[in-house]
Image (cartoon, rainbow, N blue to C red):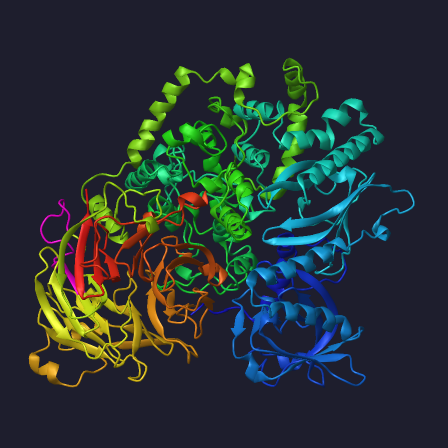
């Protein structure tokens, strides 16, 4: 279960109030001094793709018993049982926001509304009956949303309008409900989009919002949207000769109908990308008190990101604003020169990295006038990254690698990370695997890359900031915190993950080097849960011992490391990788710095060329989720910092620095302008550029940057050698164990080279593929499931692989017989009847050492049966070890699966939809650790396993749940049905997290497999399509492919190589959905060497060996084949 709240309710309300301004800073809205605003609602509570329509003051009377789970809700109601608040109409739901913070906000999805009725008489009221409700932020706290799928039984919810006739709400509400009854998803989306555009187009700027309507002159006005992390707020942008205004279409948060700022308070205006297009404009504001006689303004935060409707409209706005700023500088008496090269105009050129400003800032950093932190923040800003867009959040490097020692010696080179290599290349073993995959892509003439994930993406930013921005995390995760095992818990563990995980190459964020430390402390008492791996409750982040349990001390030491001599002399190498000439192209390949093609700016060409709106939306979603490379700033090697330069701007960890990173960026503008203005003027004159604008230039434009010669390069190599030697793992002792463990964790099989031909054309690659080890008729009819009992032995294995276990293949046929065959020769070692299997699940077979008896040569084999039992067999003795009465005999076991890293546990699912979790370790101890005798087998089987939890129950009269999978730790379970549905569960809850339609045609879901990134599940469907479902988007289909091998029967996640799927045509197809652009190269191919025993025989199931290297395939005629990599 989630961690419990340990602070009293009153204190929690105070905490919520304390952090409300910071939450608003990150979710939109304007500053309102002394005015009333919503205490907890923000645009973050809209679902993905949802828009705000309107709001009205009202009261609500809830059905009897519906608010019983919330203590204090009854006391909050008046004598008539009504709660005062606001009705907020959204495009996909209606939300009631009670005034009393004790009562949760209640959301009613419009697609679940069953009755909407206006009440007659004099009352301006209506009743709503909804099949599903969502409770949000009870007590003002950021906890998992509570979904009630049985709300229909509660009855009607009554709403009374306070100052408006009911028709004001019922007309738009009824229109939206009618749209949500449209069955076609594209048509429904188009209808909602039409309404959204009409609402935004109808907005008109109200000139009453002008500070001085008599004298102010509007010089630019356009539709725009204010962009904050995960939030888009539409409105009208207006620019006058004195101020900038933004008027939201709806003042959703209350009290600020229009935000404004005087032009004198603007520090810079930057062009930005929004939603992948050049339509953004970021306006930076000076700190309070720095704007002279200007007021403080009512925008929240140090900057605002605005999205215009086109690039041409954005450019017109930029020119109008720069002109107004220059005129303001002249009017304030700053002089002609200052109007051109000083103030906001100069600040804009500085932060956009225009020629002269970029080079001058680099020169200032080199000589020590600018710190490492400020220089990296500046490069992020110049490269288009900022704090208003999670897809373009500033990126910072890991600088240390020692997070385990009791003390930290910053003079010791061994404590630092190698900055010359990207994170993904720091572990040689992982890099070798990625290089091989990239080689295969090149052979197939596909766009090659090393890393399918990026070093900065929205999910990674919120992974670090979950404690500081919990509402954003809940928004990204569809209303629930991520599984505790996947959350940020320990700095040391996160570092070790980026070193070894195949899908984790994330860098850090500026928050690791600047205050506040709230992202390291669970000051809000968030219920983040307990980890399954060690039972630890997630609270404050576990800091390195050398931080002395002080988040502030950690930040200061981390900043000191960034400013150290060691990092100062090497940080230019990391800049080359992220912002410089090694970011892409041949130099990136040489530096092992090649990411997925969709993460680069030129990927927009593929997006613009895509004419299919569905595919285009899919590409956009992938681009935003994958992460984005910054704009490339430098075309040649970045110069090294001067020796001893770090001492000129030395950082003292004992001196407090309270400036957060977003405010620090704007404060840096003033510092750099004062420092660099003379340098820039002389530079521009030398380049004959005058005051003109230029693009982001390379370093070869100025002689000052030609000083990086052979001597410095040699010195760098010598310095790097020591650090690299310390980082190279030995090849003895623990390293061998680590390598073996890692190999066992990835069931990846090299099935050969990719072919450009679609598999439907019966084309196969000409080389590679698989070689058959053996093929035997093991069962009388179709094979239901196959499993390896151990790793597949390779030539490098000495003795028996798998810790003394004998390699074998276990298979279950629909003839209700379990058979075990030798892995090498195919000889039968054991056969047992398992009862009437009937429609046996394709994933209803598991092997586990947890239930094995001591000294066994084979692990225990678990098989689900249609009689409701799960049987465990001792293959060595040929006897039944035990039986779980898992489900009723009338339901049977529809599916079972076992977490890889929790071998003592299994999930079972009945065909009727009951999901249960069991501990099977007790099977091995039924007779004091001895094997059961034959006499014992004749006794009635008993439930020797321990029942842990009943996870959920589904009403499934019309479908059967027939396949299942779970993650390695057992923190997520999924089941698939014969009617095309997939359901997901978090084992800590009693109901499904979501249920999604994976197969629109209603054909069966025959197999499920979690993708290596842990955020997607692959689904094999009876219509021949493999589909990718997004776990964080409630099962939304993000990609699909007809694999051309007939109706699919099984699916395997093949590590970094994508998917393997079996089909009724008798072939195995390989497809890598991460090769997403262009669409033409995402074609699957048939795996060479895997062929059906005879014509017309289909593949019925398949399994990969633990650690990879081989496949076992079951066929419809009862045959089982074993295939090894053809190397």
Percent position of residue 435, x then y: 31, 38
Q: Is residue 186 magenta?
A: no
Q: Is residue 519 left or right of residue 197?
A: left
Percent position of residue 899, x then y: 30, 64
Q: Is residue 805 left or right of residue 507?
A: left
The residue range painted magenta reads 793-810
Name the residue rendered at 67%, 61% in the picture. Answer: 52
Quarter of the figure with the N terminus? bottom left
Residue 929 visible at all: no
Quadrant housing residue 363: top right
Q: Could you tell me what secondary structure mostly forms the magenta stretch?
A: loop
User: Of 482 and 278, which appears nearest the observer?
Assistant: 278
Q: Is residue 454 left or right of residue 43?
A: left
Percent position of residue 748, x then y: 27, 50
User: Of 637 and 846, which appears nearest the observer?
Assistant: 846
User: Of 677 and 60, which appears nearest the observer?
Assistant: 60
Residue 16 visible at all: yes
Percent position of residue 286, x then y: 71, 39
Vertical arrangement, residue 630 with respect to residue 917, above or below: above
Quadrant housing residue 417: top left
Vertical arrangement, residue 479 with respect to residue 1057, above or below: below
Quarter of the figure with the C terminus? top left
Mark count: 0
Q: Is residue 809 magenta?
A: yes
Vertical arrangement, residue 83 with respect to residue 351, above or below: below
Q: Is residue 707 left or right of residue 733?
A: right
Name the residue rendered at 41%, 49% in the picture. Answer: 491
Name the residue rendered at 75%, 63% in the picture. Answer: 36
């Amino acid at each position: 279960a989630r961690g419990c709240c340990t602070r009293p309710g009153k204190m929690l309300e105070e905490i919520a109030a304390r952090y409300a301004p910071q939450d608003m800073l990150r979710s939109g809205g304007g500053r309102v001094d002394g005015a009333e605003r919503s205490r907890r609602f923000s645009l973050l509570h809209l679902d993905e793709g949802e828009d705000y329509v309107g709001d009205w003051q009202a009261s609500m009377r809830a059905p009897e018993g519906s608010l019983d789970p919330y203590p204090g809700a009854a006391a909050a109601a008046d004598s008539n049982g009504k709660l005062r608040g606001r009705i907020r109409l959204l495009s996909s739901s209606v939300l009631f926001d009670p005034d009393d913070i004790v009562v949760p906000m209640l959301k009613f999805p419009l697609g679940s509304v069953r009755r909407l009725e206006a009440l007659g008489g004099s009352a301006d009221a209506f009743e709503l009956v909804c099949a599903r409700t969502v409770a949000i932020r009870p007590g003002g706290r950021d906890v998992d949303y509570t979904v009630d799928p049985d709300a229909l039984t509660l009855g009607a919810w009554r709403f009374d309008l306070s100052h408006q006739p009911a028709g004001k709400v019922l007309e738009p509400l009824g229109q939206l409900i009618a749209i949500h009854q449209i069955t076609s998803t594209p048509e429904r989306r188009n209808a909602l989009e039409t309404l959204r555009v009409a609402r935004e187009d109808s907005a008109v700027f109200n000139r009453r919002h002008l500070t001085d309507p008599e004298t102010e002159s509007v010089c630019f006005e356009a539709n725009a949207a204010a962009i904050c992390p995960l939030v888009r707020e539409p409105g009208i942008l207006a620019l006058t000769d004195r101020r900038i205004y933004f008027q939201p279409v709806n003042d959703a948060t209350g009290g600020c109908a229009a935000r404004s700022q005087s032009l004198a308070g603007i520090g810079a205006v930057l062009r930005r990308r929004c939603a992948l297009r050049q339509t953004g404009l970021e306006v930076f504001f000076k700190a309070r008190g720095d704007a002279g006689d200007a007021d403080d303004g009512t925008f929240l935060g140090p900057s605002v990101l605005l999205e215009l409707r086109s690039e041409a409209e954005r450019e017109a706005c930029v020119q109008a604003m720069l002109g107004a700023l220059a005129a303001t500088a002249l009017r304030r008496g700053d002089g002609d020169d200052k109007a051109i090269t000083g103030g906001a105009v100069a600040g804009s050129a500085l932060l956009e990295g225009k020629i002269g400003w970029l080079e001058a800032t680099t020169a200032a950093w080199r000589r020590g006038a600018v710190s490492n932190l400020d220089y990296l923040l500046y490069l992020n800003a110049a490269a288009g990254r900022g704090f208003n867009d999670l897809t373009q959040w500033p990126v910072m490097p890991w600088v240390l690698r020692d997070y385990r020692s009791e003390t930290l010696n910053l003079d010791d080179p061994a404590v630092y990370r190698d900055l010359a290599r990207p994170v993904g290349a720091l572990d040689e073993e992982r890099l070798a695997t990625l290089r091989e995959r990239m080689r295969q892509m090149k052979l197939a003439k596909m766009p090659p890359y090393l890393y399918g994930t990026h070093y900065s993406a929205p999910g990674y930013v919120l992974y670090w900031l979950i404690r500081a921005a919990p509402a954003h995390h809940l928004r990204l995760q569809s209303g629930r915190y991520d599984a505790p095992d996947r959350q940020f818990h320990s700095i040391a563990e996160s570092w070790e993950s980026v070193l070894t995980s195949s899908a984790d190459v994330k860098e850090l964020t500026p928050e690791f080097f600047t205050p506040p430390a709230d992202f390291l402390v669970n000051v809000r008492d968030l219920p983040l849960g307990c980890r399954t791996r060690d039972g630890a409750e997630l609270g404050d982040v576990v800091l390195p011992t050398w931080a002395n349990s002080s988040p502030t001390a950690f930040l200061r030491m981390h900043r000191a490391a960034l400013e150290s001599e060691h990092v100062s002399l090497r940080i230019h190498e990391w800049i080359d990788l992220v912002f410089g000439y090694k970011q892409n192209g041949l130099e990136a390949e040489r530096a092992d710095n090649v990411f997925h093609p969709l993460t680069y700016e030129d990927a927009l060409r593929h997006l613009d060329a895509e004419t299919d709106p569905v595919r285009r939306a899919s590409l956009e979603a992938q681009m935003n989720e994958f992460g984005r490379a910054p704009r490339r700033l430098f075309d040649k090697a970045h110069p090294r910092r001067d020796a001893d330069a770090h001492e000129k701007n030395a950082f003292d960890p004992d001196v407090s620095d309270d400036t957060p990173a977003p405010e620090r960026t704007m404060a840096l503008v003033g510092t750099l302008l004062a420092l660099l203005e003379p340098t820039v003027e002389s530079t521009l004159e030398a380049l004959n550029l005058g005051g003109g604008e230029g693009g982001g230039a390379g370093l070869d434009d100025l002689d000052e940057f030609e000083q990086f010669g052979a001597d410095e390069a040699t010195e760098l190599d010598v310095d790097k050698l020591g650090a690299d030697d310390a980082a190279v793992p030995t090849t003895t002792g623990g390293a061998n164990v680590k390598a073996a463990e890692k190999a066992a964790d990835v069931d990846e099989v090299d099935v050969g080279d990719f072919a450009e031909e679609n598999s439907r054309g019966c084309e196969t690659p000409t080389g590679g593929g698989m070689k058959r080890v053996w093929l035997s008729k093991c069962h009388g009819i179709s094979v239901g499931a196959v499993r390896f009992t151990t790793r597949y032995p390779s030539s490098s294995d000495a003795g028996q692989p798998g810790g003394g276990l004998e390699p074998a293949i276990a298979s279950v046929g629909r003839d209700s017989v379990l058979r075990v065959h030798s892995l090498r020769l195919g000889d039968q070692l054991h056969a047992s009847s398992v009862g009437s299997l009937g429609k046996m699940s394709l994933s209803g077979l598991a092997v586990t050492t947890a239930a094995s008896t001591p000294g066994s040569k084979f692990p225990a084999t678990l098989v689900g049966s249609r009689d409701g039992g799960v049987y465990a067999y001792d293959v060595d003795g040929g006897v039944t070890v035990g039986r779980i009465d898992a489900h009723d005999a009338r339901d049977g076991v529809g599916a079972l699966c076992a977490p890889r890293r929790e071998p003592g546990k299994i999930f079972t699912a009945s065909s009727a939809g009951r999901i249960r979790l069991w501990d099977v370790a007790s099977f091995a101890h039924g007779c004091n650790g001895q094997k059961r005798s034959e006499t014992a087998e004749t006794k009635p089987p008993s439930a020797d396993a321990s029942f842990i939890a009943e996870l959920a129950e589904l009403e499934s009269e019309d479908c059967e749940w027939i396949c299942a999978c779970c993650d390695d730790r057992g923190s997520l379970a999924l089941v698939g049905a014969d009617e095309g549905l997939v359901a997901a569960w978090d084992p800590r809850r009693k109901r499904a997290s979501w249920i999604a339609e994976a197969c629109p045609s209603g054909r069966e879901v025959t197999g499920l497999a979690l993708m290596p990134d842990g955020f997607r599940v692959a689904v094999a469907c009876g219509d021949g399509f493999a589909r990718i479902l997004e776990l964080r988007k409630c099962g939304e289909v993000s990609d699909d492919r007809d694999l051309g091998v007939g109706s699919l029967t099984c699916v395997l996640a093949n590590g970094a190589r994508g998917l393997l799927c079996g089909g009724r045509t008798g072939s195995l197809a390989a497809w890598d959905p991460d090769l997403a652009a262009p669409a033409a190269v995402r074609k699957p191919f048939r795996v060479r060497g895997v062929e059906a025993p005879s014509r017309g025989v289909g593949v019925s199931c398949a399994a990969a060996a633990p650690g990879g290297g081989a496949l076992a395939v079951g066929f419809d005629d009862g045959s089982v084949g074993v295939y090894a990599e053809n190397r």
